[in-house]
């Protein structure tokens, strides 16, 4: 039984969840090669739609995502990857999770503090 | 600050997470109207890519998803919706979560039991 890469132009959505806390850390997209690399290497690897290439999360920051479990849904067009996140945060803006904004009274509000300084990681 | 519906042909991915247990229950897609309905009604509503129309989760089964919190990610192209799931399961195949298959030794293996009989719900 294979994943269905046909519904989304060769991609599946990949939900990344902290394997201990259950927090959803980010959502990326994987093509068939990115998924195979994720399984083979044990580090979450995505396909960047904007840069049109594979990227292993953490290749710049060191904040890699160690795969603990992979599940797929009933349609086989999405994967749920439970990970151990290396480093203080997953988001390139310095937050623990990319989902740091909540909808409150019709506006998106930053609902937590940064856990690291992104400039110290991404601009070397 | 608006959501970015431009990267995915007018859609954003919507991760549905149980607000108490943290379990990821399903992933759907929302267009702008589905997102607005979700916010306005308090019930998770999606855009079906295969049927090309809006659908409120639970409109057939009664297994609605009551919105408890909505977050978005750094790129504003994905939403995370924490819900209270009405009914025994979210998956139309009878499972609590659509993510009932895990990768084990290179194969997708059903890793839990059904929580309801889908035929009793969907074929009336």
Image (cartoon, coloured by chain):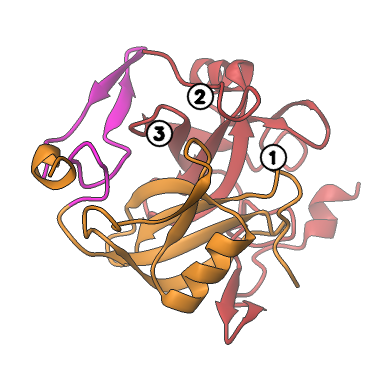
Chain colours: A orange, B red
Dot 1 surroundings within 10 Å: few (below 14), some, or many (20 or more)? few
Magenta highlight on residue A107 = yes
Eyeballing the image, is A103 above or below B101?
A: above
Q: Residue at x 83, y 56 (%)?
A: B120
The overriding secondary structure of the stretch rendered in magenta is loop
- Asked if the residues shown at circle 2 and circle 3 are in contact, with their CB atoms under 8 angstroms apart, the answer is no
Q: Position of residue A29 (x, y in %)?
A: 53, 48
Which residue sits at x=48%, y=21%?
A: B4
Tag 1–tag 2 contact (CB < 8 Å): no
Foreground of the two, A39 or B79: A39
Mark 1 vs mark 2: give the one in front. Answer: 2
- Compared to residue B72, the image places residue A10 above or below, namely below
Question: With A30 as the anchor, is A8 left or right in this view?
Answer: right
What residue sits right under mark 1 in the picture? B62
Q: Earlier in the sequence, mark 1 or mark 2?
A: 2
- Residue B66 at least partly seen: yes
Q: Secondary structure at mark 3?
A: strand
Q: How far apart are labels 3 and 1 at the CA level?
A: 18 Å
Q: Chain of mark 1?
A: B
Decide which of A112, A45 is in the foreground and name it: A45
Q: Earlier in the sequence, mark 2 or mark 3?
A: 2
Q: Quadrant of the C terminus of chain A?
A: top left
Q: Which residue is mark 2?
A: B42
B101 inside magenta stretch: no
The quadrant of the picture occupied by the N terminus of chain A is bottom right
Q: Nearer the N terminus, badge 3 or badge 1?
A: 1
Image: A42 above or below A115: below
Q: Which residue is mark 3?
A: B68
**SS at circle 1:** loop
Looking at the image, the residue that sits furthest to the bottom is: B105
Against B37, residue A68 (above or below) is below
- Stretch of the chain drawn in magenta: A89-115
């Amino acid at each position: 039984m294979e994943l269905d890469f046909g519904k989304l132009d060769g991609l599946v959505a990949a939900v990344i969840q902290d394997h201990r806390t259950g927090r959803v850390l980010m959502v990326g997209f994987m093509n068939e090669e990115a998924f195979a690399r994720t399984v083979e290497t044990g580090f979450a690897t995505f396909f960047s739609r904007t840069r049109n290439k594979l990227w292993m999360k953490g290749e710049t920051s060191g904040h890699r995502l160690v795969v603990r479990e992979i599940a797929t849904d009933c349609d086989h067009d999405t994967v749920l990857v439970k990970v151990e996140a290396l480093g203080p945060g997953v988001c390139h803006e310095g937050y623990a999770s990319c989902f740091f904004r909540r909808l409150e009274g019709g506006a998106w509000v930053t609902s937590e503090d940064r856990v690291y300084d992104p400039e110290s990681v991404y601009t070397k």
